[in-house]
Amino acid sequence: MNVIKTLGIGIAAIALFFVMMAAFTHGNQPNLEETFEPQIPALVKRIGEWDMTTFMLIMTDDGYAKLPASSKTLFDQLKQNYGAVVSTGQPELMNHQHYSALIGTSFTTATYRVPVTFEMQQGTLRITLVAKNDEIKLQGMRLL
């Protein structure tokens, strides 16, 4: 009888642990509409400057480190072919992921598809943003 009672208490403790972890993870997720979406138009305008110094400021360290060595040449070509950003359309959330940490920093990533009107033509940007320590940075982008 003691063995069954001890086993029952152990199983209940494990189940309670997983329920608490799920509540902690879910409770710390930011509201995507309030966190990311208001920042997107200003961020896209900065992307449209096609300047390496600007990218260094708006990107995560990891994202900036992954830029190819030919980025300066590519940005010059994009500036010639597209020009600056004139306006942005409604961002469409493609996916998001929240990473919770009991020790360390929790963060959320979100990928959006954003229609953009440039000076010379239309385009769509796929941007991946990271919210960490009350700061939003660009992790990566692709002009579609």
Image: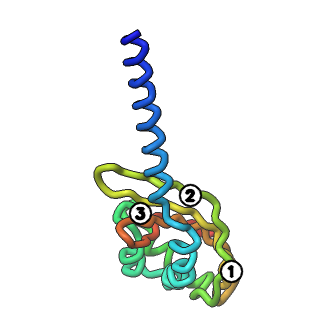
Disc number at residue 96? 2
- Farthest-out residue, front: 1
- Farthest-out residue, left: 103
- Farthest-out residue, right: 122
Amino acid identity at mark 3? Gly
Mark 1–mark 3 distance (CA, rounded to whole Å): 24 Å
Confirm whether residue 144 shows in the render. no
Q: Are marks 2 and 1 in contact (CB under 8 Å)?
A: no
Q: Colour scheme in the image? A: rainbow
> Can you identify the residue that label 1 sits on?
89
Q: Nearer the viewer, residue 65 or 11?
A: 11
User: Residue 105 at x, y = what percent?
Assistant: 33, 57
Badge 1 density bin: few <14, some 14–19, many ≥20, Cα 10 Å: few
Task: Identify which residue is drawn at 41% across, 52% down.
Answer: 100
Task: Identify which residue is drawn at 48% across, 49% down.
Answer: 23
Q: Nearer the viewer, residue 48 or 111?
A: 111
Mark 3–mark 2 distance (CA, rounded to whole Å): 17 Å
Mark before the other along the chain sequence, 2 or 1: 1
Amino acid identity at mark 1? Gly
The local secondary structure at tag 3 comes to helix
The local secondary structure at tag 2 comes to strand
Closest to the camera, between mark 1 and mark 3, is 1
Confirm whether residue 138 shows in the render. yes
